[in-house]
Amino acid sequence: MMEIKLSCCHFHFLCYLLAASLVFSHAHNHGNPANEIVDIINKNRTDQKLPHLNDSPGLGCMALQYIELCKGNCTGNNVVNCKPSEDDFTEVFAPNCGVELPTFGTITGHVIGCQKKYVEPSIAFSQVLVKDKSSLSILKNKSHTEVGVGLVGVHKGPFFWCVLFSNGQTNSTFVLENRGEGIKQKTGCYSGSSAPCSGAQKSGFAPSSIFSMSYVLILLFTFL
Ligand SMILES: *[C@@H]1O[C@H](CO)[C@@H](O)[C@H](O)[C@H]1NC(C)=O
Ligand SMILES: *[C@@H]1O[C@H](CO)[C@@H](O)[C@H](O)[C@H]1NC(C)=O
Ligand SMILES: *[C@@H]1O[C@H](CO)[C@@H](O)[C@H](O)[C@H]1NC(C)=O
Ligand SMILES: *[C@@H]1O[C@H](CO)[C@@H](O)[C@H](O)[C@H]1NC(C)=O
């Protein structure tokens, strides 16, 4: 009897721990891989004693617009063959995001990559985005003060990732009208967004956390 009670207690305790850790990790990055890439970029920079970059939702949203435009142009060797013009930034990307034009700042760098399959944020960082000397030197540039990341995949791929850097102040550049609440995000996701990735679950952005969450719930209902 004693033994059963104990293991039952242990079991419940374990469930609570699991549930708590899931809720925490979920709340931390909203199941948004773009936020995770921002964290990885900042960890990489601060490990090299470079300043931390602020997460700018305006830049993130424009990074998503950038790859929306380039979605058809992933070459066989995973190069994004696409050159948006300067005007695209102010005439297409910013208006699509509701970036207030007077707050449009200076883009100090961008890194873009594509791949047939979806990969986890850490792999996307090291094998898709920052995989050569030129992208590494962009990552390490001291001019940047803020960063935004977007990613998108079409059906089974290819998947696209884009990082935009700027030297502005997060509060005063790339400000989103109405705090970005009016943005109708059709596909993909971007860093700093209050909305979760849309159209993403099918492509495998965050199925594991949903799966383990339901598993915990089923266990709780079965045993409580
Ligand atoms: C995508 O590739 C096609 C074919 O090479 C090219 O004509 C088009 O301009 C590219 N799109 C962009 C946005 O650069
Ligand atoms: C850093 O970025 C700025 C702005 O884009 C550029 O002018 C400068 O040359 C870059 N510095 C290095 C070391 O690449
Ligand atoms: C930063 O990222 C680059 C590219 O993936 C990697 O080569 C380097 O070792 C990383 N640096 C640190 C300190 O993590
Ligand atoms: C924005 O500005 C406010 C007031 O000046 C400050 O409290 C806040 O920390 C700033 N936020 C960011 C992200 O810089």
Image (cartoon, grey):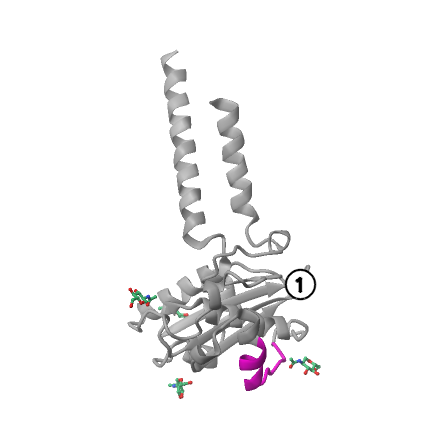
Residue 52 pos. (x, y %):
33, 69
Is 155 located above or below residue 103 in the figure?
A: above
Q: Residue at x 54, y 46 (%)?
A: 208
Give the position of the N terminus as an image quadrant: top left
Q: Residue at x 51, y 39 (%)?
A: 213
Which of the 4 image quarters holds residue 187?
Answer: bottom right
Is 13 located above or below residue 86 in the figure?
A: above
Q: Residue furthest left?
A: 49
Is 46 located above or below residue 1 in the figure?
A: below
* Span highlighted in magenta in the image: 80-92
Which of the 4 image quarters holds residue 170?
Answer: bottom left
The residue type indicated by label 1 comes to Val
Whether 91 is among the magenta residues is yes
Residue 73 pos. (x, y %):
66, 75
Q: Which residue is mark 1?
A: 154
Instruction: Using the rendered image of the protein, determine whether residue 191 is visible from the camera's viewpoint.
Output: no
